[in-house]
Amino acid sequence: MLLTVIIPAFNCEKTIARSIKSTGVYSNNEIEVIAINNGSTDSTEKIIKKIIKKNKNVKYAESISGVSNARNKGIELSTGKWITFLDADDYITDTRKFDLKKYSSPSFASTDLIFFNYFVGHSKVNLYSMTETKNDVKQLLTTVLENPTKYLTVWGKLYRTNTIKKNGIHFDTSLSYSEDSEFLIRYLLSCRHVVFEDSFLYNYCLSEDSTVRKYNPSMINEYQKAIQKIRKDTFPYPYLKRSYLIFVLMQFNLMMVHNVFIEPSNQLQQLKAMCKKEYMAEALTAINLGDIFTPRLTPLVLCKYHFYFPASLIYKFRVFQNTKEQ
């Protein structure tokens, strides 16, 4: 088997059949799909079991709740040389872009990770064109950390199964947010060589039910837990320190837009309080007034110099933009 597609399946009765079909498992005997039911209460299990009766390369498994538990179970059961992750409400755009024979050839023997471009709704994210240094893993790690919303997704990539298992890399089940980021960073730290393909493989489907679009009182604590875990992962590598601090700032932006500023009370007070936290005070040292005209850093520069009110207006505007896009 050349490729294992791991699909965590939780209450996805409306989309799971489409996701499985999109993998190409019906037309390519070198692809296996492992759909892991992790606590569904709808017809998800019934649909998957109906599919596996017609295709021996589609496999059903179960795990305890949580997407990380499901993905870890899929890794454990995988038999392909490569692994890719697919969310049950998303789909692969064209499986012909899986040139599995090429990726298993001697010329790819030292390649551990393959990046593809992807769609977010109808918008294109072209990682190939935006990545200047594609082959230097150290330089790539700095790029990935400083641009987490573009790069730090677990899907849309091929991972060498042996690299995952040999290094004991797994999803941290204690994390509820940014578990993708933490997994990919640790995986990259184990990579010898990375390849970027100039093709669009994955379609991330926007949903109003997405957890990042709803207020969650525990979100900030969970993000902070992931930040500390990634600090631990990157601490042994001094060349990643500044990039890690930029990563923290990008996570702070997410916390503001997806949590603090969609809840009407005490927004300004929460912004001030979070900027005074030790990890944020350290991260804010990585930027200066020269970054004021970089859109994603603008509110952070304002926070660094204690201009909290104009920073809050920017975050409110970004929340408004997100609401319009839903």
Image (cartoon, helix red, strand yellow):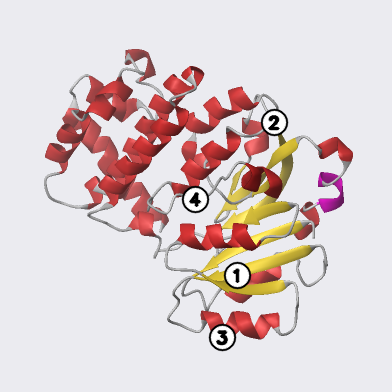
Query: Which badge, 2 or 3, is on the more N-terminal residue?
Result: 3
Q: Is residue 86 visible?
A: yes
113 shown above or below 98: above
Along the line of sight, which residue is nearer the eye, 309 or 80? 80
Whole-percent x, y for residue 63 in the image: 49, 69
Along the line of sight, which residue is nearer the eye, 214 or 188? 188
Give the residue number, with chain letter if any, for mark 4. 171
Q: Residue at 67%, 60% (x, y): give it.
A: 78
Whole-percent x, y for residue 66 in the image: 43, 63
Marks 2 and 4 in Cβ contact (< 8 Å)? no
Whole-percent x, y for residue 183 in the image: 51, 44
Give the residue number, with chain letter if any, for mark 2. 192
Disc nearest the viewer among 4 and 1: 4
Marks 3 and 1 in Cβ contact (< 8 Å)? no
Whole-number angstrom distance, CA of label 3 to CA of label 4:
27 Å
Q: Which residues are magenta?
A: 99-103
Query: Which badge, 3 or 4, is on the more N-terminal residue?
Result: 3
Q: Main secondary structure of the magenta part?
A: helix
Whole-number angstrom distance, CA of label 3 to CA of label 1:
12 Å
Query: Which badge, 4 or 1, is on the more N-terminal residue?
Result: 1
Disc nearest the viewer among 3 and 4: 4
Give the residue number, with chain letter if any, for mark 1. 35
Other-residue count near label 1 (Cα within 10 Å), few / some / many at <14 / 14–19 / ≥20 = many
Give the residue number, with chain letter if any, for mark 3. 46
Give amino acid for label 1: Ala
Marks 4 and 1 in Cβ contact (< 8 Å)? no
265 shown above or below 127: below
Whole-number angstrom distance, CA of label 1 to CA of label 2:
29 Å
- Label 2 secondary element: loop
Residue 18 lies in the magenta stretch: no
Other-residue count near label 4 (Cα within 10 Å), few / some / many at <14 / 14–19 / ≥20 = many
